[in-house]
Amino acid sequence: MGSKTKYKILLILFTICFIASAILSFVSIEQACGGTQTGCYAVQTSKYETTFGIKNAYLGLGAYFLIGLLAIFQIKHSNKERKNLITAGVVFASLIV
């Protein structure tokens, strides 16, 4: 698999995650989770819904936006530093989630 293909796939995944974060940020929790009797609703209304007082969905919006931008720039003009930032972002996000 070519390097650009890898970053295009990552960009698609980051976009999907960005959209999911946007839904959780701007749509009512009941509507986004499909009701109040779901696991999604339970998590979104629990103490795990925030990190340092900030909604996780907002953190996701910012993180996926920034990593998505890095992926776009990496597709257009590859460089080692950007590759390392994307890798660090993916690893950090994986550890947090």
Image (cartoon, grey):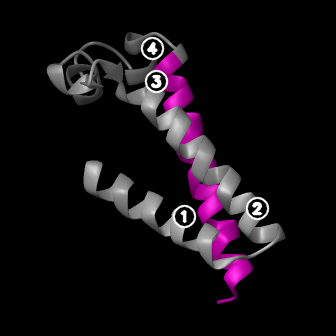
- Amino acid on which the number 2 mark rests in the picture: Phe
Residue at mark 2: 73
Assign a secondary structure to mark 3. Answer: helix
Which residue is painted at 68% across and 83% down in the image? 3
Residue that extends furthest to the front in the rendered view of this protein: 81
**Quadrant placement of the N terminus:** bottom right
Mark 2–mark 3 contact, CB under 8 Å? no
* Mark earlier in primary sequence (4, 1): 4
Point out which mark residue 58 bears. none
Res. 37 image quadrant: top left
Of circles 2 and 3, which is in front? 2
- Amino acid on which the number 1 mark rests in the picture: Ile
Residue at mark 3: 24
* Mark earlier in primary sequence (3, 1): 3
Of circles 2 and 4, which is in front? 2
- Amino acid on which the number 3 mark rests in the picture: Leu
Q: What stretch is highlighted in magenta?
A: 1-25
Question: What is the C-alpha distance between the residues marked 2 and 3?
Answer: 27 Å
* Mark earlier in primary sequence (2, 1): 2
Assign a secondary structure to mark 4. Answer: helix
Assign a secondary structure to mark 2. Answer: helix
Residue at mark 4: 31
In this rendering, is residue 28 above or below 80? Answer: above
* Mark earlier in primary sequence (2, 3): 3
Where is residue 22 shown, x and y percent of the image? 56, 27
Of circles 3 and 1, which is in front? 1
Question: Residue 37 or 41: which is nearer the viewer?
Answer: 41
Which residue is painted at 81% across and 72% down in the image? 77
Residue at mark 1: 86
* Mark earlier in primary sequence (3, 4): 3
User: Is residue 37 rendered to the left or right of residue 26?
Assistant: left
